[in-house]
Amino acid sequence: MSEITLRTDIDADRTKVYEALNTHDGLTGWWTTGVNREGEVLLFDFPEIPEPFRLRRDRADKEEIVWTPIGAFPPHWSGTVVTWQLTDIPEGTGTRVDFRHAGFAADDPDLPHTDDTWSRLMTRLKEYAETGTAQPFFTL
């Protein structure tokens, strides 16, 4: 199995980062303007994508946020898990985000594109949490 791992230090307290990853306004501030929720299932819509990404929120606190894809789309996300670990930056102030999207097939041809997209999204998350200015990567 293959995985994507990224680390980003954000000059914002853990509450701001948590809210960016766990609230409607937060998620629409850096990822996509198409965010909805059905109970513990987050629905993410993207331009020209036939159906929303459906991610079940398995854990959401100021230490760790875990999402499990449960929809049929995108098919290469089936069996994967997205994890965001939030810790204090050891040598300063702010929040360290350790991101992991694990469980991809070793030969998944979409993995490089997914890795690139998550890298860009981490930059948007950092900018949003630090400034409060919404700049979603995808807009509907």
Image: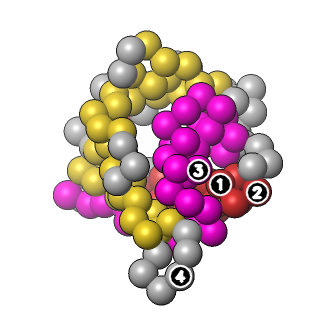
Label disc, if present, on residue 129 of the rendered structure? 1
| Element type at mark 4 | loop
* Label 4 or label 1, whichever comes before in sequence order: 4
> Which residue is the site of mark 2?
131
Residue 19 drawn in magenta: yes
Asked whether, in this view, residue 28 is left or right of residue 108, the answer is: right
Mark 3 Cα within 10 Å, few/some/many (few <14, many 20+)? Answer: many
Task: Say if mark 3 contacts mark 4, CB within 8 Å.
Answer: no
Are the residues tagged 3 and 1 within 8 Å (C-beta)? Answer: yes
Q: Which residues are magenta?
A: 1-30
Secondary structure found at label 2: helix
Secondary structure found at label 3: helix
Amino acid under disc 1: Ala
Q: Are marks 2 and 1 in contact (CB under 8 Å)?
A: yes
Looking at the picture, which amino acid does disc 3 mark? Lys
Residue 81 percent coordinates (x, y): 29, 44
For label 3, the residue is: 16
Instruction: Give the amino acid at mark 2.
Output: Thr
Q: Can I make out residue 13 in this image?
A: yes
Spatial CA span between label 2 and label 1: 6 Å
